Image (cartoon, grey):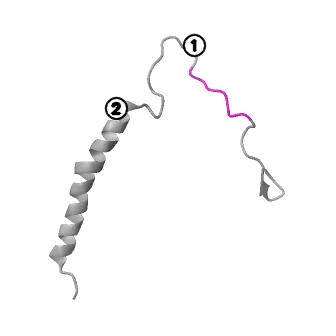
Amino acid sequence: MPRSRWTERLGQLGLVVLYFAALTPVGWAARAVRDPLHRARDPDRASYLEPPPRGGPARRTAGRWR
């Protein structure tokens, strides 16, 4: 039996409500607890420049990644 247009609309509306009622507050809470981009200002630091990772970037030689 084919689904009606109203059934599909209610399913979409349910997903929108789920997103804004559940996932959005979880994201806000996660950002309130930690700072993933390290945006907090530290007055004791002389510089915010971080050294590159040891070993440098991946290089491609002869068709292979090292």
| Residue 21 in picture, x, y percent from top left | 22, 49
| Quadrant holding the N terminus | bottom left
Q: Is residue 48 left or right of residue 33?
A: right
Label 2: which residue? 32
Which residue, as the protein is rendered here, is positioned at the far bottom?
A: 1
Q: Mark 2 is on which residue type?
A: Ala
Instruction: Give the extent of the magenta segment.
Output: 48-54
Residue 52 magenta = yes
Label located before the other in sequence (2 or 1)? 2
Mark 2 Cα-neighbour bin, 10 Å: few <14, some 14–19, many ≥20: few
- Name the residue rendered at 15%, 74% in the picture: 6
- Name the residue rendered at 60%, 24% in the picture: 49
Q: Mark 1 is on which residue type?
A: Ala
Label 1: which residue? 46
| Real-space CA distance between mark 2 and mark 1, rounded to the nearest whole angstrom | 26 Å
Disc 2 on helix, strand or loop?
helix
Residue 18 magenta = no
| Residue 2 in picture, x, y percent from top left | 22, 86
Residue 10 found in image quarter: bottom left
37 versus 47 height, above or below: below
Examine the residues drawn in magenta and state their main secondary structure: loop
